Image (cartoon, rainbow, N blue to C red):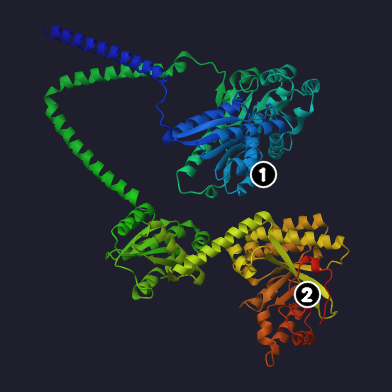
Amino acid sequence: MNRRKSFVLTSVLMFFSVVCALAGAALLIFIFLKNQTSSFVADNVDESKYSYVLYISSYDPRYLITQNQLEGIEDSMRKFNLMYEVMYMDMLNYGTRENFELFYQTLKHKLSMRDIKYKALIVSDDAALTFVELYHDELFEGIPVVFFGVNNIEHAKQVQKYPWITGFGERIFVEDTIEVMVEQNSKLSKIYCILDDSLTGRGDRAQFLSAMKKYPNLAYEFITISRNSLERLADRLQEIESNAAILSLSSLQSYAHRNAFSVYELINFFRSYAPKIPVYRTNAVGIGSGFVGGKVVNHYASACRAVETINEILNSNKRIEDFPYEDLMDGLYLFDYAALKEFNIDPSSLPEETVFLNKPENLIKKNKNLFASVSLIILSLVSMLIVFIVSYCKSKKVNEIVMAMNKRMRQINKELIDSKTKLTFVANNDGLTELPNRSHGEEEIKKLITASVPFTLFLMDVDDFKNYNDTYTHACGDFVLKEFGRRLARLTVTGDYFAARYGGDEFLLVYKNGHIEKNGREIELLRQTLNEPMYFHGTKLSITATLGFADSQIDISYDNLLTNADIAMYEAKKIGNGTCLGFMPEMKETILKRNSVIDILNAECECGGFEIRYQPQVSTETGDVYGFEALVRLRDYAIGPDVFIPVAESSGYITQIGRIVTEKVLRQMAIWRKNGMKLRKVAINYSNGQLVDDGYVAYLKKLLDDYKIPANLIEIEITESLFMGKKGRASQLFEQLAEIGVGLALDDFGTGYSSLSYLTFVPANKVKIDKSLVDNYLVDGKEDFIQNIVQLVHGLGMKLTVEGVEHKWQYDKLCSMKCDYIQGYLFSKPMSADDVPSFEVAV
């Protein structure tokens, strides 16, 4: 009887398992058919939600690289709800100026017929980047551009100067591929490098030469296919020794097109005339059709990165200038399994992530998805059967199991609540300081604005934070930020303040009890709290914070209020570290004027709109002109150097202006010499902001060589501010100038507290004293001061130039003191270059 019951139960369970298996198989088939059907159904696209992007490819859609790039464009555009159109330049097949011009006319006509304007532009490879650089202002004014796939790295870096363009260079993986060639060919003694004369080919040649420096024992030879006929190329291939290998860097397609056959026929041509020589590639074209393989660029990933950048530009507050240039290094090892076997190369010598083409697959691996699905169905059926049997055998313990499950559910619910609380904290607070983060702070401030509650907003910046971060390690930087976070958190305990981390070393602080008094007790307590010294591992850090604050107003927006506080902080920085300053409307006018000067400098740097004036320096010994000081002026604006030079230094334009001035001076000296004028020494001012220009001395040396100007006729004038806190970099500059034979002059001597010490430190040939010393000390009873400076300078073996001399009696006194050179309005105001040849000293 029991056996019969067991048989019935077993039969029922088997029948149930069969039904489940059939149902699972039917469901799998249904899902498969549904997916197949859905792939043919067009998406219901609401075009109003999309931004339109134009993608310009340098090549044609049949080219393998173009196909990979287009797949990345397609997948990423769909991901970010972007609509795009593609235009192909086909410059591999038709690399002519006529084709370039035809593409321009076609695109221009297309744009004139469109109602919907493009929001952004993506270009791939060198030809498309060159096209956009030429015609952007005409066809795509104001439209951001992102490029990728550019092999000419120097060109890619150069176009970053345009405010509307950014992107990624493409370095081919020559070094990685050569490393594989050496590892796979133990008898390798020579590498033949195949390339062409194109812009890309020249860049490939440079990368190959750089990579070969690691293998001094290997010989190499270039085969430039664009310079060889088919007959000559066949001869060269047949001459290749058996202990050599070939590395093909060229695109091959343009050469094949020129000879009226396909790129794959060209690959067969290589195999026919060098059948025993393995051909490696840094380009996917040809791998799988006869070439062994190599490390190639992941063009799909590069295209995805370009679309991601476009999406971030269109949908964030970032400007295109915030995206720095970088080289993309996305690559993959791609090899032909059949070719490896043909040349007796072990595939296991390659990295694990290598992708193999033409590799035979077994049935299970080929249909792994199907087998996995069937296995899961069977496993689920077995699991259900086991659970059923165990449940049947333990039916008496059902209540205990249910209770245990309820207990576990309560525990899980508690964990979920705790997790939600933690996630809420993480979403609203800064991970380092535990203060509310930027978005949380913005939300709270906007609530106060909406409620029309009067309050004061502070923007705080840690002074010299980078210096502490670099000097005492990043651990010290984190300590400083956390300590300021704790101090601000203490202020919020009473409810009078709200604090948040704004980002980096900046914090937001809100005084919620109305508008704070500009010079009241609260301000002083705030400064004392924030500027107390800190102690990091026993080291005292006298670190301070600068604050700018602005009062809320009716109908003021969050952005405008924050801008006011930022302007106040900027002005406070000018006063000095640890300052707290309130916003005043006239501050905004100062900022607007500064921004106006920046715009002018930007425009004038582009068009070279600077004029050089020359003020003579007269020798007291001969009474004749010794030299000139070159002084830069804005040609078309009534803005003096006392205004635009400080702005140029703070905005970074001073390096570009410094180079423009240097070039103009040396070019003018060459013109004077050509016109028969005897050249005299010219002094060029060098600002401390130019120290970041590491290539300035090399640039100066090149100009000296180009214009054939003797180095001893150029003198660089510096001030002591140049080496305050930058002694190492300044010393390097002095050494470089000395190497090329250019002299140094220490300008504005006597106006700084460290002038005497700098006389022994700076290898200057000349010292210049400022007009203020002449006005204040070249008077009766104080003349000894000037005389002492003369004796000090001469005692150190230097010459002395006195600036700002306006009267004959001043000149006579300075001559009696044996000053070397005199400069000032007594002789001439700064004059134009045309007036210099005819100038004569008249005292």
What amino acid is labelled 2 in the image? Gln
Q: Nearer the viewer, residue 172 or 91?
A: 91
Q: Is residue 227 left or right of residue 347?
A: right
**Front one among 62 and 702:** 62
Q: Is residue 277 left or right of residue 725?
A: right
Query: Does dot 1 land on a helix, a strand or a loop?
Result: helix
The residue mark sitting in front, 1 or 2, is 2
Residue 724 found in image quarter: bottom right
Q: Residue furthest right?
A: 676
Quadrant in the picture for residue 535: bottom left
Q: Which residue is depicted at the point 79% across and 61% down? A: 668
Residue holding disc 2:
617
Q: Is residue 256 above or below residue 671?
A: above
Distance between the alpha carbons at the discs numbered 1 and 2: 42 Å
Which quarter of the rendered picture does the N terminus lie within? top left
Depth check: 425 or 629 in front? Answer: 629
- The residue located at (41%, 57%) in the rendering is 559
Q: Position of residue 487 (x, y in %)?
A: 36, 65
> Quadrant location of the C terminus?
bottom right
Asked which secondary structure carries label 2, the reply is: strand
The residue under the point 74% across, 86% down is: 810
Location of residue 400 (image quadrant): top left
Q: How far across and down, in percent of the image, does residue 321 sit?
A: 55, 49
Count of residue discs: 2
Which residue is drawn at the image coordinates 39% and 66% (left, top)? Answer: 550
Position above or below: 769 against 649: below
Residue 617 visible from this viewpoint? yes
Q: Residue 272: x and y, percent?
A: 73, 16
Furthest toward the bottom, the residue is 781
Q: Is residue 31 above or below residue 696?
A: above
- Residue kind at label 1, given as amino acid type: Glu
Circle 1 is placed at which residue position?
Answer: 154
